[in-house]
Image (cartoon, grey):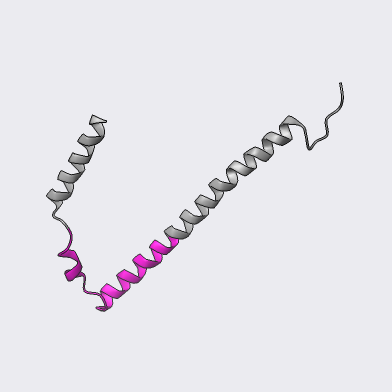
């Protein structure tokens, strides 16, 4: 039986495929981490601006839906998922 080189051994091919598949996952996780950092930075800035009066939170909160509307929408969505 001929001896296989390390480059063509089934284990080496599987490792390469696994590395290639994980590479995409690592890219997605890196991007998600960067986005989380940006959201944290935005939250910090928003808090600072509202405390110092640069941003009036009262105007923004009037655009939010009532709690009952949010719960009704959540219930409707849950019912739709149950039907499918």
- Horizontal and vertical percent position of residue 1: 86, 21
* 31 to the left or right of 42: right
Task: Tell me if residue 83 comes above or below residue 71 in the rendering.
Answer: above
Q: In which quarter of the image is residue 52?
A: bottom left
- Horizontal and vertical percent position of residue 63: 17, 63
The structure residue drawn at horizontal position 24% and vertical position 78%, both measured from the top left corner, is 53
Q: Does the magenta stretch include residue 74?
A: no
The structure residue drawn at horizontal position 31% and vertical position 70%, both measured from the top left corner, is 46
Q: Residue furthest top?
A: 1
Quadrant containing the C terminus is top left
Q: Is 81 or 61 nearer to us in this picture? A: 81
Q: Count the labels in the image.
A: 0
Q: In which quarter of the image is residue 79?
A: top left
Q: In which quarter of the image is residue 21?
A: top right
Q: Does the magenta stretch include residue 55?
A: yes
The structure residue drawn at horizontal position 55% and vertical position 49%, both measured from the top left corner, is 26
Stretch of the chain drawn in magenta: 37-64
Task: Tell me if residue 70 comes above or below residue 16 in the rendering.
Answer: below
Q: Residue furthest front?
A: 84
């Amino acid at each position: 039986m001929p001896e296989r080189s390390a480059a063509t051994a089934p284990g080496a091919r599987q490792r390469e495929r696994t590395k290639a598949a994980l590479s995409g996952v690592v890219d997605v996780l890196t991007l998600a981490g960067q986005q989380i950092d940006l959201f944290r930075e935005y939250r910090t800035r928003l808090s600072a601006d509202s405390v110092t009066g640069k941003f009036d939170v009262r105007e923004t909160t009037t655009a939010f839906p009532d709690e009952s509307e949010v719960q009704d929408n959540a219930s409707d969505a849950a019912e739709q998922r149950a039907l499918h």
